[in-house]
Image (cartoon, rainbow, N blue to C red):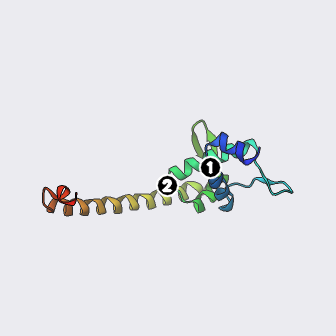
Amino acid sequence: MRIGEMVRRTGVSERLLRYYEEQGLLAPTRLPSGYRVYDDADVDTVRRIRTLLAAGLPTATIVQVLPCVRDDGPNLVPVCSDLVAELRRERERITHAINDLQASRGMLDAVIAAGPADAEAMVQ
């Protein structure tokens, strides 16, 4: 299928499909004319990519993860022995980022609470 059909079937823009290819996440066949041709398995790959991105993984990690997961209904299941350890490291990275954001929000809350009660009215 050509890129337009891939967009229709996945809901992912042409720009994102090209980006996934640039990042090594997708490898469509190229016709002599340069047009990309995707197969049905690429639709599943895009779904996996979207799932892993939504889980907070960077594309550099997804490149390593994709060959090591299989579908089990709506879930992805690791099939490479070292993948779980890598995913635990990514989970820890995400946990630290969440903690940092919560600390930042707490600081903002303190600054806001210390301000005048009618501060919003003063801004407008």
Query: To which residue does mark 2 refer?
Result: 56
Residue 100 found in image quarter: bottom left
Residue type at mark 1: give it.
Answer: Ser
Q: Nearer the viewer, residue 107 or 6?
A: 6
Q: Quadrant of the C terminus?
A: bottom left
Query: What residue lies at 67% left-to-right and 57% top-to-bottom?
Result: 18
Q: Is residue 29 left or right of residue 47?
A: right
Residue 52 in the image, given as x and y percentages of width and height: 56, 51
View extreme (front): residue: 124
Secondary structure beneath disc 2? loop
User: Disc 1 and disc 2: Cα gap in Å?
Assistant: 20 Å
- Residue under label 1, please give it: 13
How many residues crowd around disc 1 within 10 Å: few (fewer than 14), some, or many (20 or more)? some
Depth-wise, is mark 1 or mark 2 nearer the camera?
1
Q: Which mark is residue 74?
A: none
- Taking 35 as reference, is 94 left or right? left
Above or below, 41 against 122 in this view is: above
Q: Amino acid at mark 2?
A: Gly
Residue positioned 58% across, 59% down in the render: 59
62 vs 118, left or right, is: right
Task: Report helix, strand or loop for mark 1.
Answer: loop
